[in-house]
Amino acid sequence: MAVQKNKNVSVTMVRKLKSSVDAVFAAWTQPRLIAKWLANGADTVTSVSIDLKKGGHFRLEGLNGDGKPYAYSGTYLDLIEDRRVALSWIYDGPVPALRSASSVVIAEIRKLDTDLTELTLTHERLTGRDEAELYRVSWIECMGKLESVAACEAVSAPVDQRDRSDFYTDSQRRMQDRFATRKLADRLESVLIHDHLSAVDAAFITRQNMVFVATADAYGQPSCSYKGGTRGFVTVLDERTLAFPDYNGNGMHLSVGNIDETSKISLLFVDFERQARMRVLGTANVSAEDPMRNRYPGSERIVRVTIESVFTNCPRYLHKMKLVEESDFVPSADATTPDPAWKRLSAVADVLHDDDKHLAGLDTNLDKTLNKD
Protein backbone atom coordinates (compact mmCIF):
# COMPACT_ATOMS: atom_id res chain seq x y z
CA MET A 1 0.00 0.00 0.00
CA ALA A 2 1.34 3.42 -0.97
CA VAL A 3 0.73 6.24 1.54
CA GLN A 4 1.18 9.97 1.01
CA LYS A 5 0.11 13.12 2.86
CA ASN A 6 -2.71 15.59 2.31
CA LYS A 7 -5.56 13.60 0.88
CA ASN A 8 -3.33 11.59 -1.44
CA VAL A 9 -3.50 8.25 0.32
CA SER A 10 -3.88 5.35 -2.08
CA VAL A 11 -4.22 1.57 -2.06
CA THR A 12 -2.74 -0.51 -4.88
CA MET A 13 -2.81 -4.26 -5.36
CA VAL A 14 -1.94 -6.56 -8.24
CA ARG A 15 -3.50 -9.97 -8.83
CA LYS A 16 -3.03 -12.65 -11.48
CA LEU A 17 -6.42 -14.14 -12.28
CA LYS A 18 -7.01 -17.44 -14.06
CA SER A 19 -9.53 -15.89 -16.43
CA SER A 20 -9.60 -14.18 -19.81
CA VAL A 21 -9.42 -10.39 -20.05
CA ASP A 22 -12.97 -10.18 -21.40
CA ALA A 23 -14.30 -12.17 -18.43
CA VAL A 24 -12.49 -9.87 -15.98
CA PHE A 25 -13.77 -6.80 -17.80
CA ALA A 26 -17.29 -8.25 -17.72
CA ALA A 27 -17.00 -8.74 -13.95
CA TRP A 28 -16.36 -4.99 -13.64
CA THR A 29 -19.06 -3.84 -16.04
CA GLN A 30 -22.07 -6.18 -15.88
CA PRO A 31 -24.52 -5.51 -13.01
CA ARG A 32 -25.35 -9.19 -12.38
CA LEU A 33 -21.64 -9.99 -11.98
CA ILE A 34 -20.78 -6.90 -9.95
CA ALA A 35 -23.51 -7.89 -7.49
CA LYS A 36 -21.78 -11.24 -6.92
CA TRP A 37 -18.36 -9.94 -5.88
CA LEU A 38 -18.41 -6.27 -4.87
CA ALA A 39 -19.37 -6.87 -1.24
CA ASN A 40 -17.20 -7.96 1.64
CA GLY A 41 -17.91 -9.88 4.81
CA ALA A 42 -21.61 -10.27 5.53
CA ASP A 43 -22.57 -7.40 3.21
CA THR A 44 -25.19 -8.12 0.55
CA VAL A 45 -25.63 -6.23 -2.70
CA THR A 46 -29.31 -5.47 -3.33
CA SER A 47 -29.10 -3.56 -6.61
CA VAL A 48 -26.63 -2.36 -9.23
CA SER A 49 -27.50 0.20 -11.89
CA ILE A 50 -24.97 1.46 -14.43
CA ASP A 51 -24.83 3.65 -17.52
CA LEU A 52 -21.75 2.08 -19.09
CA LYS A 53 -20.09 4.96 -20.91
CA LYS A 54 -17.56 7.66 -20.13
CA GLY A 55 -19.45 10.20 -18.05
CA GLY A 56 -22.17 7.67 -17.26
CA HIS A 57 -23.29 7.08 -13.69
CA PHE A 58 -23.31 3.97 -11.56
CA ARG A 59 -24.89 3.12 -8.22
CA LEU A 60 -24.57 0.04 -6.03
CA GLU A 61 -26.89 -0.43 -3.05
CA GLY A 62 -26.61 -3.01 -0.33
CA LEU A 63 -27.15 -4.04 3.27
CA ASN A 64 -24.34 -4.65 5.73
CA GLY A 65 -24.23 -7.54 8.19
CA ASP A 66 -26.43 -5.61 10.63
CA GLY A 67 -29.06 -4.95 7.99
CA LYS A 68 -28.16 -1.28 7.62
CA PRO A 69 -28.31 0.14 4.08
CA TYR A 70 -25.30 1.55 2.28
CA ALA A 71 -24.50 2.69 -1.24
CA TYR A 72 -21.55 3.41 -3.53
CA SER A 73 -22.06 5.74 -6.46
CA GLY A 74 -20.00 7.67 -8.96
CA THR A 75 -19.21 8.44 -12.58
CA TYR A 76 -17.22 6.52 -15.16
CA LEU A 77 -14.07 8.56 -15.82
CA ASP A 78 -12.54 6.20 -18.38
CA LEU A 79 -13.60 2.99 -20.14
CA ILE A 80 -11.43 0.95 -22.50
CA GLU A 81 -12.94 -2.42 -23.32
CA ASP A 82 -10.99 -5.34 -21.83
CA ARG A 83 -8.28 -2.93 -20.63
CA ARG A 84 -9.38 -0.24 -18.18
CA VAL A 85 -12.20 0.91 -15.92
CA ALA A 86 -11.84 4.16 -13.95
CA LEU A 87 -14.62 5.66 -11.85
CA SER A 88 -15.21 8.17 -9.11
CA TRP A 89 -16.29 6.58 -5.85
CA ILE A 90 -18.58 7.99 -3.14
CA TYR A 91 -19.70 6.04 -0.09
CA ASP A 92 -22.97 6.67 1.73
CA GLY A 93 -23.51 4.40 4.69
CA PRO A 94 -23.07 3.69 8.40
CA VAL A 95 -19.23 3.60 8.51
CA PRO A 96 -18.02 7.13 9.43
CA ALA A 97 -14.43 6.54 8.28
CA LEU A 98 -15.61 5.88 4.71
CA ARG A 99 -17.89 8.92 4.45
CA SER A 100 -15.28 11.21 2.94
CA ALA A 101 -15.00 13.17 -0.27
CA SER A 102 -15.06 11.43 -3.63
CA SER A 103 -12.18 9.05 -4.30
CA VAL A 104 -11.17 7.23 -7.52
CA VAL A 105 -11.06 3.50 -8.30
CA ILE A 106 -9.03 2.32 -11.29
CA ALA A 107 -8.89 -1.24 -12.64
CA GLU A 108 -6.10 -1.89 -15.16
CA ILE A 109 -6.53 -5.19 -17.03
CA ARG A 110 -3.66 -6.81 -18.91
CA LYS A 111 -3.60 -10.08 -20.84
CA LEU A 112 -0.82 -12.45 -19.83
CA ASP A 113 -2.15 -15.53 -21.63
CA THR A 114 -5.42 -16.83 -23.04
CA ASP A 115 -6.79 -17.63 -19.59
CA LEU A 116 -4.44 -15.57 -17.43
CA THR A 117 -5.00 -11.88 -16.69
CA GLU A 118 -3.16 -9.36 -14.56
CA LEU A 119 -5.47 -7.01 -12.68
CA THR A 120 -4.03 -3.89 -11.06
CA LEU A 121 -6.46 -2.20 -8.71
CA THR A 122 -5.75 1.30 -7.46
CA HIS A 123 -7.98 3.18 -5.04
CA GLU A 124 -6.65 6.71 -4.81
CA ARG A 125 -7.47 10.14 -3.37
CA LEU A 126 -8.38 8.64 -0.01
CA THR A 127 -8.41 11.02 2.93
CA GLY A 128 -6.35 9.13 5.49
CA ARG A 129 -4.75 5.94 6.72
CA ASP A 130 -7.89 4.69 8.50
CA GLU A 131 -9.99 4.92 5.36
CA ALA A 132 -7.19 3.38 3.27
CA GLU A 133 -6.82 0.43 5.63
CA LEU A 134 -10.56 -0.27 5.64
CA TYR A 135 -10.61 -0.26 1.85
CA ARG A 136 -7.43 -2.35 1.65
CA VAL A 137 -8.99 -5.14 3.73
CA SER A 138 -12.26 -4.86 1.83
CA TRP A 139 -10.62 -4.97 -1.61
CA ILE A 140 -8.55 -8.03 -0.70
CA GLU A 141 -11.73 -10.00 0.05
CA CYS A 142 -13.59 -8.62 -2.96
CA MET A 143 -10.71 -9.47 -5.30
CA GLY A 144 -10.92 -13.08 -4.16
CA LYS A 145 -14.62 -13.14 -5.01
CA LEU A 146 -13.97 -11.40 -8.33
CA GLU A 147 -11.58 -14.15 -9.39
CA SER A 148 -14.26 -16.79 -8.83
CA VAL A 149 -16.91 -14.76 -10.65
CA ALA A 150 -14.62 -14.06 -13.61
CA ALA A 151 -13.65 -17.73 -13.83
CA CYS A 152 -17.33 -18.75 -13.98
CA GLU A 153 -18.01 -16.06 -16.58
CA ALA A 154 -15.15 -17.33 -18.75
CA VAL A 155 -16.72 -20.79 -18.76
CA SER A 156 -20.23 -19.57 -19.64
CA ALA A 157 -19.23 -16.80 -22.07
CA PRO A 158 -19.59 -18.87 -25.29
CA VAL A 159 -23.33 -19.16 -24.65
CA ASP A 160 -23.80 -15.48 -25.56
CA GLN A 161 -21.08 -14.26 -27.89
CA ARG A 162 -22.11 -11.98 -30.70
CA ASP A 163 -21.19 -8.59 -32.14
CA ARG A 164 -23.21 -6.06 -30.18
CA SER A 165 -22.20 -3.21 -32.50
CA ASP A 166 -25.12 -4.32 -34.69
CA PHE A 167 -28.58 -4.44 -33.11
CA TYR A 168 -29.47 -7.37 -35.34
CA THR A 169 -27.95 -10.87 -35.24
CA ASP A 170 -26.40 -12.57 -38.26
CA SER A 171 -29.45 -14.79 -38.60
CA GLN A 172 -31.81 -11.83 -38.49
CA ARG A 173 -29.69 -10.12 -41.14
CA ARG A 174 -29.90 -13.19 -43.36
CA MET A 175 -33.69 -13.16 -43.09
CA GLN A 176 -33.78 -9.44 -43.92
CA ASP A 177 -31.66 -10.06 -47.00
CA ARG A 178 -33.72 -13.07 -48.02
CA PHE A 179 -36.96 -11.07 -47.91
CA ALA A 180 -35.45 -7.73 -49.02
CA THR A 181 -36.18 -5.80 -45.81
CA ARG A 182 -32.66 -4.86 -44.63
CA LYS A 183 -33.05 -1.20 -45.59
CA LEU A 184 -36.41 -1.01 -43.85
CA ALA A 185 -34.96 -2.72 -40.77
CA ASP A 186 -32.07 -0.26 -40.66
CA ARG A 187 -34.43 2.69 -40.99
CA LEU A 188 -36.69 1.40 -38.21
CA GLU A 189 -33.66 0.87 -36.00
CA SER A 190 -32.56 4.47 -36.48
CA VAL A 191 -36.08 5.86 -35.96
CA LEU A 192 -37.57 3.63 -33.25
CA ILE A 193 -34.79 2.06 -31.20
CA HIS A 194 -33.02 3.97 -28.45
CA ASP A 195 -31.03 3.10 -25.33
CA HIS A 196 -33.10 5.02 -22.77
CA LEU A 197 -36.69 5.89 -21.92
CA SER A 198 -38.20 9.09 -23.23
CA ALA A 199 -40.78 10.96 -21.16
CA VAL A 200 -43.51 9.38 -23.32
CA ASP A 201 -42.02 5.90 -22.80
CA ALA A 202 -41.92 6.38 -19.03
CA ALA A 203 -45.51 7.62 -18.94
CA PHE A 204 -46.62 4.62 -21.02
CA ILE A 205 -45.00 2.18 -18.58
CA THR A 206 -46.51 3.81 -15.49
CA ARG A 207 -50.01 3.42 -16.98
CA GLN A 208 -49.67 -0.37 -17.32
CA ASN A 209 -50.84 -2.99 -14.83
CA MET A 210 -49.20 -5.97 -16.54
CA VAL A 211 -46.10 -6.94 -18.48
CA PHE A 212 -44.90 -10.03 -20.33
CA VAL A 213 -41.41 -11.07 -19.21
CA ALA A 214 -39.08 -13.17 -21.36
CA THR A 215 -35.90 -14.72 -19.97
CA ALA A 216 -33.54 -17.49 -21.06
CA ASP A 217 -31.49 -20.11 -19.25
CA ALA A 218 -27.83 -20.94 -19.87
CA TYR A 219 -28.80 -23.34 -22.67
CA GLY A 220 -30.71 -20.63 -24.52
CA GLN A 221 -34.14 -22.08 -23.70
CA PRO A 222 -36.54 -19.12 -23.43
CA SER A 223 -39.33 -18.74 -20.90
CA CYS A 224 -42.17 -16.23 -21.12
CA SER A 225 -44.13 -15.17 -18.06
CA TYR A 226 -47.04 -12.84 -17.40
CA LYS A 227 -46.61 -10.46 -14.46
CA GLY A 228 -49.56 -8.48 -13.16
CA GLY A 229 -50.06 -5.83 -10.49
CA THR A 230 -51.84 -2.57 -9.89
CA ARG A 231 -51.52 0.15 -12.50
CA GLY A 232 -47.97 1.52 -12.40
CA PHE A 233 -46.50 -1.50 -10.58
CA VAL A 234 -43.41 -1.34 -12.81
CA THR A 235 -41.43 1.57 -11.40
CA VAL A 236 -39.36 3.85 -13.61
CA LEU A 237 -36.32 4.60 -11.43
CA ASP A 238 -34.58 6.63 -14.11
CA GLU A 239 -34.30 6.74 -17.90
CA ARG A 240 -32.27 3.54 -17.95
CA THR A 241 -33.58 1.57 -14.97
CA LEU A 242 -36.86 -0.18 -14.16
CA ALA A 243 -37.95 -2.20 -11.13
CA PHE A 244 -40.90 -4.47 -10.48
CA PRO A 245 -41.96 -6.88 -7.70
CA ASP A 246 -41.81 -10.65 -7.77
CA TYR A 247 -44.85 -11.83 -5.82
CA ASN A 248 -45.60 -15.26 -4.38
CA GLY A 249 -45.96 -17.77 -7.20
CA ASN A 250 -45.91 -21.50 -7.84
CA GLY A 251 -42.37 -22.02 -6.55
CA MET A 252 -40.84 -22.95 -9.91
CA HIS A 253 -38.87 -19.65 -10.08
CA LEU A 254 -38.34 -19.93 -13.83
CA SER A 255 -37.96 -16.20 -14.51
CA VAL A 256 -35.87 -15.24 -11.49
CA GLY A 257 -33.78 -18.40 -11.87
CA ASN A 258 -33.00 -17.51 -15.46
CA ILE A 259 -32.19 -13.92 -14.47
CA ASP A 260 -29.78 -15.14 -11.82
CA GLU A 261 -28.12 -17.43 -14.38
CA THR A 262 -27.89 -15.28 -17.52
CA SER A 263 -29.28 -11.82 -16.54
CA LYS A 264 -30.91 -11.45 -19.98
CA ILE A 265 -34.45 -10.07 -20.01
CA SER A 266 -37.04 -8.72 -22.41
CA LEU A 267 -40.21 -6.92 -21.35
CA LEU A 268 -43.30 -6.51 -23.53
CA PHE A 269 -45.79 -3.88 -22.36
CA VAL A 270 -49.21 -4.07 -24.07
CA ASP A 271 -52.00 -1.52 -23.66
CA PHE A 272 -55.01 -3.32 -25.08
CA GLU A 273 -57.32 -0.37 -24.51
CA ARG A 274 -55.16 2.02 -26.55
CA GLN A 275 -53.86 -0.74 -28.82
CA ALA A 276 -50.20 0.11 -28.22
CA ARG A 277 -47.15 -1.91 -27.26
CA MET A 278 -43.52 -1.34 -26.35
CA ARG A 279 -40.49 -3.58 -25.80
CA VAL A 280 -37.60 -3.16 -23.39
CA LEU A 281 -34.45 -5.28 -23.73
CA GLY A 282 -31.69 -5.38 -21.15
CA THR A 283 -30.10 -7.15 -18.23
CA ALA A 284 -31.60 -7.74 -14.80
CA ASN A 285 -30.75 -8.74 -11.28
CA VAL A 286 -33.05 -10.03 -8.57
CA SER A 287 -32.80 -9.61 -4.80
CA ALA A 288 -34.89 -10.55 -1.77
CA GLU A 289 -33.09 -7.86 0.25
CA ASP A 290 -33.83 -4.95 -2.06
CA PRO A 291 -35.16 -2.03 0.04
CA MET A 292 -37.74 -1.36 -2.68
CA ARG A 293 -39.74 -4.27 -1.28
CA ASN A 294 -41.14 -1.70 1.17
CA ARG A 295 -42.94 -0.08 -1.78
CA TYR A 296 -44.65 -3.34 -2.73
CA PRO A 297 -46.64 -5.03 0.06
CA GLY A 298 -46.49 -8.79 -0.34
CA SER A 299 -43.45 -8.79 -2.63
CA GLU A 300 -40.86 -11.51 -2.08
CA ARG A 301 -38.15 -10.15 -4.36
CA ILE A 302 -37.43 -7.13 -6.54
CA VAL A 303 -36.27 -7.38 -10.15
CA ARG A 304 -34.23 -4.42 -11.40
CA VAL A 305 -33.74 -4.00 -15.13
CA THR A 306 -30.87 -2.09 -16.74
CA ILE A 307 -32.14 -0.95 -20.12
CA GLU A 308 -30.16 -1.61 -23.29
CA SER A 309 -32.85 -1.02 -25.94
CA VAL A 310 -36.34 0.44 -26.02
CA PHE A 311 -38.65 0.42 -29.01
CA THR A 312 -42.33 0.67 -29.91
CA ASN A 313 -43.95 -1.97 -32.11
CA CYS A 314 -46.62 -1.71 -34.79
CA PRO A 315 -50.03 -2.03 -33.04
CA ARG A 316 -52.14 -3.26 -35.96
CA TYR A 317 -52.71 -6.85 -34.76
CA LEU A 318 -53.56 -5.90 -31.18
CA HIS A 319 -57.14 -6.72 -30.24
CA LYS A 320 -58.96 -3.88 -28.53
CA MET A 321 -60.03 -4.91 -25.03
CA LYS A 322 -61.21 -3.12 -21.92
CA LEU A 323 -60.23 -3.83 -18.34
CA VAL A 324 -63.07 -5.27 -16.26
CA GLU A 325 -61.23 -5.37 -12.97
CA GLU A 326 -57.71 -5.92 -11.60
CA SER A 327 -56.98 -9.25 -9.93
CA ASP A 328 -58.03 -9.63 -6.30
CA PHE A 329 -54.82 -11.58 -5.75
CA VAL A 330 -52.54 -8.56 -6.23
CA PRO A 331 -51.19 -7.89 -2.72
CA SER A 332 -52.31 -4.70 -1.04
CA ALA A 333 -51.53 -3.03 2.27
CA ASP A 334 -55.25 -2.32 2.70
CA ALA A 335 -56.68 -5.81 2.21
CA THR A 336 -55.99 -9.46 2.95
CA THR A 337 -54.79 -11.31 -0.14
CA PRO A 338 -56.91 -14.42 -0.88
CA ASP A 339 -55.22 -17.78 -1.26
CA PRO A 340 -55.01 -19.38 -4.73
CA ALA A 341 -57.23 -22.41 -5.31
CA TRP A 342 -54.41 -24.57 -6.71
CA LYS A 343 -52.81 -24.78 -3.28
CA ARG A 344 -55.79 -26.88 -2.21
CA LEU A 345 -54.98 -29.58 -4.78
CA SER A 346 -54.23 -32.96 -3.22
CA ALA A 347 -51.37 -33.37 -5.72
CA VAL A 348 -49.31 -30.67 -3.93
CA ALA A 349 -50.61 -31.07 -0.37
CA ASP A 350 -47.49 -32.79 0.96
CA VAL A 351 -44.97 -30.43 -0.68
CA LEU A 352 -46.44 -27.01 0.05
CA HIS A 353 -44.15 -24.45 1.65
CA ASP A 354 -44.33 -24.46 5.45
CA ASP A 355 -46.17 -21.13 5.35
CA ASP A 356 -48.89 -22.75 3.23
CA LYS A 357 -49.29 -26.14 4.94
CA HIS A 358 -52.62 -25.04 6.39
CA LEU A 359 -54.01 -24.69 2.85
CA ALA A 360 -53.51 -28.35 1.94
CA GLY A 361 -56.71 -29.84 0.57
CA LEU A 362 -58.26 -32.70 -1.34
CA ASP A 363 -59.19 -31.01 -4.63
CA THR A 364 -58.37 -33.09 -7.71
CA ASN A 365 -59.65 -31.13 -10.74
CA LEU A 366 -56.50 -29.39 -11.98
CA ASP A 367 -58.09 -27.80 -15.06
CA LYS A 368 -60.96 -26.30 -13.10
CA THR A 369 -58.63 -25.03 -10.40
CA LEU A 370 -56.54 -23.24 -13.03
CA ASN A 371 -59.64 -21.78 -14.75
CA LYS A 372 -59.08 -23.82 -17.92
CA ASP A 373 -62.33 -25.76 -17.64
Image: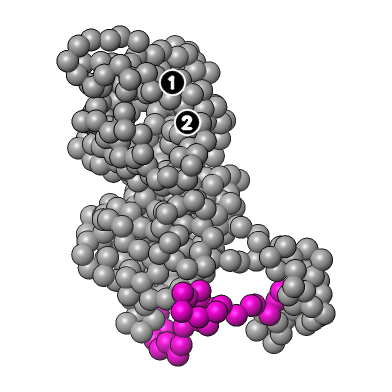
Does residue 360 lie above or below 90 as drawn? below
Q: Quadrant of residue 132?
A: top left
- Please state which of residues 230 and 33 is positioned toward the viewer in this rendering: 230
Residue 335, percent across and down? 50, 80
Q: Whole-percent x and y of residue 28? A: 39, 31
Helix, strand or loop: magenta stretch = loop
Q: Amino acid at mark 2?
A: Asn
The residue carrying pointer 2 sits among few (fewer than 14), some (14 to 19) or many (20 or more) residues within 10 Å by Cα, namely some
Give the image quarter of residue 34: top left
Q: Nearer the viewer, residue 353 or 76?
A: 353
Q: Which residue is mark 1?
A: 137
* Three-letter code for the amino acid on which mark 1 is drawn: Val
Look at 65% across and 61% down and name the residue there: 251
- Whether label 1 touches label 2, CB < 8 Å: yes
Res. 271 image quadrant: bottom left
Q: Position of residue 240 (x, y in %)?
A: 29, 53
Q: Residue at x 47, y 63 (%)?
A: 245
From mark 1 to mark 2, how far is it between C-alphas? 9 Å
Magenta extent: 318-343
Where's residue 142, x and y in %?
46, 26
- Image position of 46 with respect to 185: above or below: above
Check if residue 257 falls in the magenta segment: no
- 142 vs 90: above or below: above
Q: Quadrant of the N terminus?
A: top left
Looking at the rendering, in which quadrant would you find the C terminus?
A: bottom right
- Mark 2 falls on what kind of element? loop
Q: Give the left or right position of residue 237, taking residue 324 as reference.
A: left
Q: Which residue is mark 2?
A: 40
Disc ID at residue 212: none
| Residue projecting furthest to the front | 96
Q: Is residue 200 visible?
A: yes
**Direction from residue 236 to residue 367 in the image, left or right:** right
